Image: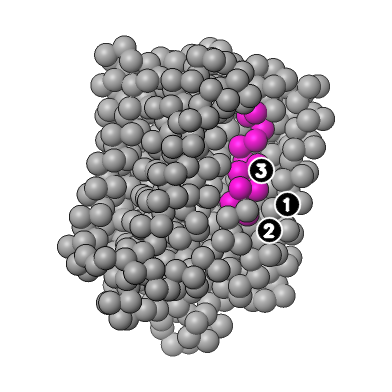
Amino acid sequence: MKKAPEFTTFSKQVGSIIAINIILLVLGIIQVPIVTKNLGPSLYGMWSLINSTISLIIPFSMLSFSMSIIRFLAVEKDLNRIREDFYSACSLVFISGFILSLIGFILSGLLATAFLKDNNAVSYIRLSSILILLNSIFPILLAFFRTGNKIAIYNFLNLGLTILQVGLIIVFVTLGYELTGIIMAFIISALLLDLIAFIIVAKQIGFQRPRFTNMKTYLKWGIPLIPSSAILWIISVSDRYIINHFLGISAAGIYNAAYGIGFYSSFILMPIGIVLYPIISKLYDEGKRIECADYFKYAFKYLMMFTVPAAVGLSILAKPLLRILTTSEFVSGSSVVPLIAFGGVFFCFYQIGIYVIHLVGKTKINFNLLVIAAILNVILNIVLVPHLGILGAGLASLLAYTVLGIFTLIITERYLKFSLSFFFILKSLISSAVMAGVIWLIRPNSLSTIIISMVAGVIIYFGALALMKGFGKEELNFLVSFTRNKKQFS
């Protein structure tokens, strides 16, 4: 078979983003104890609900332009067209983000009483409202670098944002500003990175006054995706509000901490998706369906190679992780972590499949799939949370993500068939079970033993997978090319 150097570029870019995401993961883990131990379950629960509300609003202010830019500019060669479309999109997002931030500020009292049930939250909501604007612009700027294959700059901006966030959080918390300081840390870091990213873009393509010439096409393609983003929010975030209603804001904080740790199982999804979507968009537009299917095949296989053992490992380490990273009040959430961790695996099913649906322009299918999962999730939460507490919310999330992921892959086959490597997934599950047994024997109960367990787990997992011939010469070449450009995937 003829060798395809494009796969080497793909895997090399994915590898660089994986490396950055591992650093981001470590920084995120460092951030958890700083925030939870200084805020406690109540304030942390309030912050999680405010943050969740912002995450609902942002898709409406972004107008799906982060996806539209990649979809339409991935194959564009005309610099004038790129410049015109990019600045026009940025301008529209700035306007919509500003309007929604202003609305959030004005309605802060209503939001505090209706959703958070705490008048003390008004000042926090007002301060946080600026994040709607700032957090809407940043993904648009990142989309430019994804489209232009500027992965190094993309990595630099993401890493810089997180480092600045963590650093400022430490400073403000040390000074005794609690939740106000944490919100300020997010605002300052987002503002600075937005400015830096914008300056880099302007230096690369120059500046041009937006004329909004092609925005009708962008809006026509992207607006149908906005309700889908909102409904995905219902699946992934609405359970905090239901928990707050039935169990109180402290329970919502405990659940949010457990959810955050569990969903780290899907950490590999973003690195693969960031590189994959621009490439498959270009290939599909050029009519290269076979190559497109090949990318999906290997992307899915390597998602499973990492997400399955991550879910198993996080499930085993849930209690010691929460005990070390948070306070004793949060440890009760350890029973939720396995449910969310495996929910993250099925979410990867959905995310890979939905790229196919985006390529063929069947965005209505995306909407219908999410509606089914959202209705299921809300009903299950309402039924299970009063009886099972936060465990019921975790179970509802797992079932909703499972239905969403499986249904998406089934429908995807109508438009583009690619191998799902079921036999490999079975080998990954067996290797993960062996890894879990070793971690259980170590019985980690301190930071040092947790680190030892993680290192041992990785070695045992890949060792067992190699013994079962879970990956052959093709896969080994693909993995080696993550860090080396000498070998090519065939």
Q: Given the image, on which type of amino acid does mark 1 rest?
A: Val
- At 32% from the left and 29% from the top, the residue drawn is 185
Which residue type carries mark 3? Ile
Marks 1 and 2 sit apart, C-alpha to C-alpha, by 6 Å
Indicate whether residue 70 is drawn in magenta.
no
Q: Residue at x 72, y 75 (%)?
A: 414
Q: Quadrant of residue 490?
A: bottom left
Q: Main secondary structure of the magenta part?
A: helix
Secondary element under disc 3, as helix, strand or loop, is helix
In this view, 251 is above or below 23: above
Say which mark, if any, is on residue 371: 1
Q: Amino acid at mark 2?
A: Phe
Q: Which residue is mark 3?
A: 235
Q: CA distance from mark 2 to mark 3?
A: 13 Å
| Residue where numbered disc 2 is placed | 367
Q: CA distance from mark 1 to mark 3?
A: 9 Å
* Residue closer to the observer: 172 or 294: 172
How many numbered discs, if any? 3
Q: Is residue 403 above or below residue 274?
A: above
Q: Are marks 1 and 3 in contact (CB under 8 Å)?
A: no
Label 1 element class: helix
- Report if the CB atoms under discs 1 and 2 are less than 8 Å apart: yes
Q: Is residue 252 something one can see in this rendering?
A: no
Going by the image, does 147 lie left or right of 436?
left
Going from N to C along the chain, the mark reached first, 1 or 3, is 3
Residue segment shown in magenta: 228-241
Q: Residue placed at 64% from the left, 76% from the top? A: 416
For the point 63% across and 54% down, which residue is it? 228
